[in-house]
Image: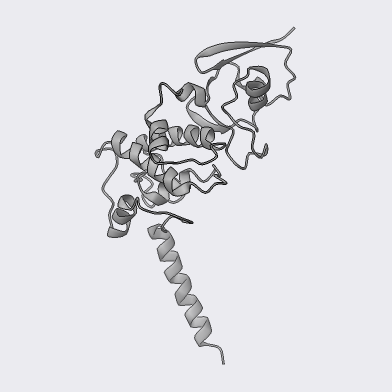
Amino acid sequence: MSTLTLTINKQDYQLENLDARTTLLDVCRQHLQITGPKKGCDHGQCGACTMLINGRRVNSCLTLAVMHDGDDITTIEGIGMPKSLSALQQAFKDNDAFQCGYCTPGQICSATALIEEVKQNWPSHVSTDLKNPDGRLVQEIAERMSGNICRCSAYPNIIKAISQVLESQVSESQVPEPSSQIADNAVQNSSVTGIWSPPPSEAQLGKTSANNKTATAITGGRS
């Protein structure tokens, strides 16, 4: 008889003779009745099942439960409950950052890890300064949350909620001031509504400008 011990939300759970093919998501939902994490695509593409494992965000539909004996696992229930919301959960509520709410547990778990990543000065794919990335920029937040899909398209308000918490928790000494007016406007612009995409980074702007010059030169050479 084999026993698997999982530590979820600071509580130990023992599972006897668990099928080794069972995902962490299915263990939580089907075996332990921890139903905060949602099964969306079941292919790791939507982020609805996101949990924190040792502080890192993980798509729990793609990881096997037997891989996490001894790990510290946190689901939305461990971040905050209705009577004890975390600052981020309260910000989602204040900013109407959800509609149907199905993806919200995964969004909040992912954003919780995002805030810690920003505090530790981790760069993202769109960071122009890899040593001192400004995680408060709108395009930074959007990039870091790109693994979580909201089919109701509450993205603008999700960005607002995360920005609100970042502004209150990340000190000025940890995050440098933006180096351009474009970046400054991106941080301050929180009145965005409707279908929206983040403003381009400086690197993307430079690439676009170069592409435009190339296209102009090619067009000019045609007869």
Q: Residue at x 67, y 18 (%)?
A: 31
Q: Nearer the viewer, residue 184 or 56?
A: 184
Pinpoint residue 16: horizontal percent, then vertical percent.
Answer: 71, 10
Total number of numbered discs in the rendering: 0
On the picture, is 147 further left or further right than 167? right
Pinpoint residue 134: horizontal percent, then vertical percent.
Answer: 34, 46
On the picture, is 69 further left or further right than 126? right
Q: How does the figure colour the protein chain or chains?
A: one colour
Pinpoint residue 186: horizontal percent, then vertical percent.
Answer: 34, 54
Report the residue that reaches farthest toward the bottom: 223
Q: Residue at x 57, y 92 (%)?
A: 223
Could you tell me if residue 8 is visible in this image?
yes
Q: Nearer the viewer, residue 104 or 202?
A: 104
Q: Nearer the viewer, residue 75 or 139?
A: 75
Could you tell me if residue 127 is visible in this image?
no
Q: Is residue 16 above or below residue 135?
A: above
Pinpoint residue 94: horizontal percent, then vertical percent.
Answer: 38, 37
Quadrant location of residue 70? top right
Q: Is residue 87 above or below residue 172?
A: above
**If the image is split into quadrants, where does the N terminus sit?**
top right
Q: Residue at x 50, y 37 (%)?
A: 107
Q: Residue at x 40, y 65 (%)?
A: 206
